[in-house]
Image (tube, coloured by chain):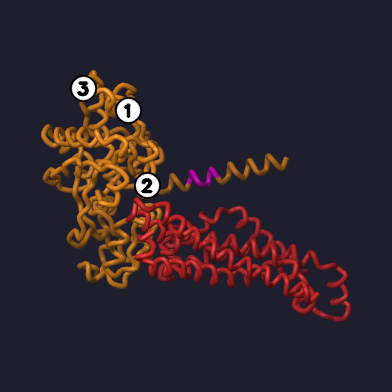
Chain colours: A red, B orange
Amino acid sequence: MEAVSSDFDLVLKAFWLTVQLLVLSGIASLVFGTVLGAMRVGPVAVLRKAASLYVSIIRNTPLLIVFVFVFIAAPKLDWFIGTPFVIKGVVALTVYTSAFVCEAVRSGVNSVPVGQAEAARSIGMTFGQSMQQVILPQSFRAVVPPLASVLIALAKNTSVAAAFGLMEATARMRSFTNDNADQRMEIFLAFALGYIIIVEVMSAGAITLERRWRTAR
Amino acid sequence: MRMKRSLAMLTGATVMLSLAACGDAGSDEESGGGPDVEVAENAADEFDDGTRMKELAESGDITIGVKYDQPGIGFKGATDDMPQGFDPEMGKILAADLGIAPEDINWKETISDNREPFLQSGEVDLVIASYSITDDRRKVVGQAGPYYVTGQQLLVRKDSDIETLDDVKGTEVCSVTGSTSLANIEEAGAKPRGFDTYSECVDQVLSGTVDAMTTDGAILLGYAAEHPDELKVVVEPFSEERYGIGYSKDHPEMCEWINGVLEESFENGSWEDAFQSTLGEAGVETPETPELDPCQ
């Protein structure tokens, strides 16, 4: 255990990067995924097709391949050369997670009865207005549990960045075990605990949201 | 139908992965090269009963863990049958002493993370995988040797401004995630960028996403030799890495045996042959034979 406690600032720094990756790509994929979700349920056929193509390509691609593309393949095409590594990590995670957010949002929208949309349109609201003011607020409620799962998966997916130049928790764990071959198990448990704390905080947040929005109904 | 579709998807993914694997293999050499080793006959009679060496010699079966991604040290391309490099050559010399021919050795890829667990669980009998001797590692496994001493240097692009170790402060330097080299360069003030393999790291240097790559000089010279117009090795070695041969603590008798075979290979020139046919090809000068640590 002394390996972890004597360099505890390094552990915190590594988890801080994990949290940064999680929060930045979480926000970005919520925004982008919601836009994609709106495109998939929207009235414009081209956008609908485009969004569903995006989802089927990205959802069928392993996250590791997305990372390889952003970090290894793209620089060969002169893309992302000067981009900071954190941003590249956020891009890779966002590209991947947005597809799942999109599907969660779509399932939420589909859970709102069609009559609601028809009523909104019949009083003269545009598609945008009826989405913003009638459908989405109701669907967010239905969407909290699946979105929480998607974001928790994202929290753990940040560990893929360990092999792509980002010194986040998993990468730091590997440098610790390399230096302290005799304390492998303790180091592993300490870092696993860090991930558990992050995920527990997230699920507690999701439960609170669920409760709050349920009483508002 | 549904079953079929997922099967087709799985096949597609496998094809993609294997294509990716082909992409970064970099060796067109014939497999199984290197100098010939003399395989001992009736080797089992040489060892005392109850020793691990006797068991191995009698079964004619040995598993050796080596690196697969370090040109010159231990490298296996996607289409190669056998790994090549200085480490596998040392493995052949050791196996030959047990009466096991090079083609009968089971090679297993070990990465930096799994060398101790593989030895402890008996998954491999020996680890010869650019395995630096450290006190921490000697607490959990045995390490005989060293059979080679090298030091950490930097690999940069030809047009780079990095000339001394001080120049790396604030720059981005890549190596393999979790390696000692990466920890050392972090201490020198660089931003560490860990990747899974050395070849990915070299790609980052070539494309300019990072400023330099760092690890043991021998490995870097191998890569510089592959890209002589684009890359160069700079900075005097700033650490000492003593490559040892890992064995399980359950068989402490192996240490004396390994040291004995190493000593013999230093004297009869097979160590030098192994070096010249591997790292020597990449332009590394054959060093003096290192001094072996006594067995504890």
- Residue occupying image coordinates x 33% and y 41%: B66
Mark in front: 1 vs 3: 3
Q: Residues within 10 Å of mark 2 (few under 14, many from 20)?
A: some
Residue A186, quarter of picture: bottom left
Amino acid on which the number 2 mark rests in the picture: Ile
Q: Does B184 appear above or below B22?
A: below
Instruction: Residue B84: tell me if it is visible.
Output: no
Identify the chain of the residue marked 3, using the numbered disc in the image: B
Give the mark nearer the N terminus: 1 vs 2: 1
User: Where does label 1 land, which residue?
Assistant: B103
Q: Which mark is residue B46?
A: 3
Magenta-colored stretch includes residue B73: no
Distance (Cα) linking label 1 and label 2: 22 Å
Element marked by disc 2: loop
Span highlighted in magenta in the image: B14-19
Marks 1,3: beta carbons within 8 A? no
Element marked by disc 1: helix
- Residue occupying image coordinates x 42% and y 52%: A185
Instruction: Residue B285: tell me if it is visible.
Output: yes
Residue B60: percent from left, percent from top: 32, 23
A116 with respect to B284 (left or right) = right
Magenta-colored stretch includes residue B16: yes
Amino acid on which the number 3 mark rests in the picture: Glu
User: Where does label 2 land, which residue?
Assistant: B111
Give the mark nearer the N terminus: 1 vs 3: 3
The secondary structure that most of the magenta stretch takes on is helix
Distance (Cα) linking label 2 and label 3: 33 Å
Mark in front: 1 vs 2: 2
Residue B120: percent from left, percent from top: 37, 40
Give the mark nearer the N terminus: 2 vs 3: 3
Q: Are marks 2 and 3 on the same chain?
A: yes
Residue that sits furthest to the bottom in the current view = A124
